[in-house]
Amino acid sequence: MRTIRAFTLVEVLIVVVLLGILATNVITTFRSYATEANATACKDDLRVLRSTIELYSVKNGDVPPGYTNNDPMQPVSSAVLLQQLVTNEHYLSNIPKNLFNESTDVTMLGNSDTFPADAPGDTGWIYKPATREIRLNWPGTDSVGTRYYDY
């Protein structure tokens, strides 16, 4: 007669624990790669936005987008920015999405406003037409310790 050898409960539990440890390592690695990919894409989106702002300014008498009627004495508006860059002029097909918070909204800073010390992360971008500066609105740092906000 032939005996059938089966795994004991302890052996099965050890295998399950080892698989769990391996899965945790794999998930952590993939999450890190996804974060790096988001950072790279956001850097590229910032490059595109900055180039678009400069192009708009050159074509509109050195007035950056965001001002009503291209008048730097008027208040700034994200709706006007969207209209100038996307709807009317078609410089962009849309405002890029901040991949960390999935937002395309732009916080506009007036001529006398200053950038916050840290990114609140409540919109996709923070833009100050007076200086033509646009920043990624996301707190935290990338894998080399650079703040996303400082890209």
Image (tube, rainbow, N blue to C red):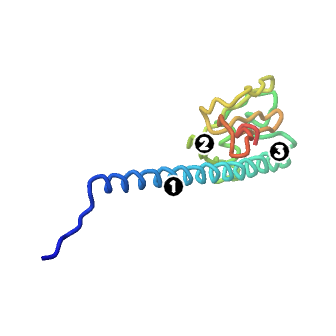
Give the mark, 2 or 1, whose residue is nearer the N terminus: 1
Could you tell me how far apart the alpha carbons at marks 2 and 3 are, in whole angstroms? Answer: 21 Å
Q: Nearer the viewer, mark 3 or mark 1?
A: 1
Q: Residue furthest bottom?
A: 1
Identity of the residue drawn at 62% across and 33% down: 121
Q: Residue at x 80, y 23 (%)?
A: 112
Distance of mark 2 from mark 1, alpha carbons? 31 Å
Seen at 63% across and 54% down, the residue is: 37
Q: Nearer the viewer, residue 151 or 127?
A: 151
Marks 2/1 in contact by CB < 8 Å: the verdict is no
Q: Is residue 118 above or below residue 49?
A: above
Q: Left or right? Give the position of 62 relative to 96.
A: right
Q: Is residue 57 left or right of residue 31?
A: right
- The mark found on residue 80 in the picture is none
Q: Secondary structure at mark 1?
A: helix
Q: Label 3: which residue?
A: 57
What type is the residue that disc 3 sits on?
Ser
- The secondary element bearing badge 3 is classed as helix
Residue labelled with disc 1: 26
Whole-percent x, y for residue 42 in the image: 67, 48
**Residue 106, located in which quarter of the rendered image?**
top right
Q: Quadrant of the C terminus?
A: top right
Does residue 70 sit above or below 112 in this rendering?
A: below
Mark 2 vs mark 3: in front: 2
Q: Are dots 2 and 3 in contact, CB under 8 Å? A: no
Q: Nearer the viewer, residue 111 or 70?
A: 111
In this image, 135 relative to 120: left or right?
right
